[in-house]
Amino acid sequence: MTGDDSKHLPLEDIHTAAGARFGAFAGWSMPLTYPAGVMKEHLHTREHAGLFDISHMKLFEVSGPQAVALLDRACPLDAGALEISQSKLSFFLNEAGGILDDLIVTRLGDTRFMVVANAGNAAADEKHLRELAANFDVKVEPLDRVFLAIQGPEAWAVLSRAGIETGSLLFMHGVEPRKDWFMSRSGYTGEDGFEIGLPEADARDLVTKLLEDERVLWIGLAARDSLRLEAGLCLHGQDITPETDPAAAALMWAIPKDIRASGAFIGADALRAAVERGPAQKRVGLKPEGRQPVRAGAALFDADGNHAGHVTSGGFGPSAGHPVAMGYVAAALAKPGTRLFADVRGTKIPVDISSLPFTPHRYRKG
Amino acid sequence: MATTYFTSDHEWLRVEGGIATVGITDYAQEQLGDLVFVELPEIGKKLTKGDTAVVVESVKAASDVYAPVDGEITEANGTLSSDPSLVNSAATGAGWLWKMKLADESQLAGLMDEAAYKAHIA
């Protein structure tokens, strides 16, 4: 699976020493699991603190007099309305309103922003952003950083013990606590937690300190996936793609009302038309009956056997204690409690549309 | 006296009196990770070598387990319906998957013994 073309994490030697099993993801050789195994890693994150190496994701600094103008064009975002240190989920859309990538944008200063992009889209995102930036007085700088996530109810405490005070930082806020560091209170597990981009040498020190704390365990990509799925969070390339727009993806909450009405972002006209028409399909949570997981690609049918949609992510939820999935269904069916049937290798598994998340979010909002 | 055979697909067969008990090896369960579901076969189902007999599902993925030889399913390990993790904790014991009546015992000659299997995964 892991060919010679794979990119390697700067801390790969540490993961190897920790006994990681590697696999290919988005062009990277990534730790999938550690000796504890996906189940224990998942539950440990929900109970204590999980440490994730997410250096496959890319940090871009966007700065200059027209940084706000560039971001307002690139994303359905009111960048100028963000307070300093405030983060916001946003997107790059294509002209049809389809989602090229989902991003976290954080305002670092009046004319400085941090943009965090997904691994698989990082190169395309950079090209997209640079092409747009040609029309603005702005600089787009990809940063060379190790990127770590520390997630779970004890994340703040283990950081504190490692000498990093997170103090009054609230969910979806980000700061630069040290030179070339970016730390935000955010993550992709549904738990309280932090993401820290930092130079490799600093990362090696931080990881060493964190792992001295028995509350901290390395967590691989397999548990990252089950954690985010239980939390109802989308994986780009599966749950959201250039063929799905934010209306169908049930992500319109990420777009401020006045921007929906009058923003001049790429894809604005198409998105307004899509909202006007109402999406044909909507993203929903799906709870399979019994213990058999229903996975991405499975077709969904209504009680009469009519095609009703498809599953985009699915697996077992270790904290939920049952299989969990999400997918797209005909908008008329997109109500919690609607019973559908998923085709799994020829067997029809009953699946109920369920509200998301499957496990409650425990973000530190104030 | 039971004889144990292994396949290159990481299954083991314990053969006694024309009946093979089949499971996956410890190496295989470790590769798969924590199992959360085992789709068991119907009793009486006739399988040809290479047919999918069982599907084992981990948190992350579903994997086929193939019939290592021709035969007819005589028993499935129902305990796995409530506790699929037995395959992880006791792959070569209580975590067995199914039993089958062999159609052609000469097929066993093409399988590995334990020493050959150990060399295979080394």
Image: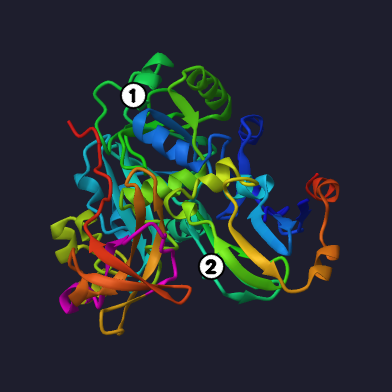
Q: Is residue A179 above or below residue A142?
A: above
Asked if residue A288 is among those painted magenta in the image, a careful observer would answer yes
Give residue B17's quadrant in the image. bottom right
- Residue A15, image x, y percentages: 61, 34
Q: Residues within 10 Å of mark 2 (few under 14, many from 20)?
A: some
Closer to viewer: mark 1 or mark 2 = 2
Q: Which residue is mark 2?
A: B41
- Residue B13, image x, y percentages: 71, 56
- Residue B115, image x, y percentages: 85, 46
Q: Residues within 10 Å of mark 1 (few under 14, many from 20)?
A: many
- In the picture provided, is A44 more to the left or to the right than A361? right
Q: Chain of mark 2?
A: B
The three-letter amino acid code for the residue at tag 2 is: Pro
> A261 or B9, which is in the foreground?
B9
Q: Are marks 1 and 2 on the same chain?
A: no
The three-letter amino acid code for the residue at tag 1 is: Trp
- In the picture provided, is B55 more to the left or to the right than B109? left
Name the element at disc 1: helix
Residue placed at 78% from the left, 73% from the top? B104
Asked if residue A327 is among those painted magenta in the image, a careful observer would answer no
Q: Is residue A36 visible?
A: yes
> A283 or A195, which is in the foreground?
A283
Residue placed at 20% from the left, 74% from the top? A333
Q: Which residue is mark 1?
A: A156
What label does residue A86 carry, if any? none
- Residue B42, image x, y percentages: 52, 70
Q: Quadrant of the C terminus of chain A?
A: top left
Highlighted range, magenta: A274-299
Q: Quadrant of the N terminus of chain A?
A: bottom right
> A198 or A360, which is in the foreground?
A360
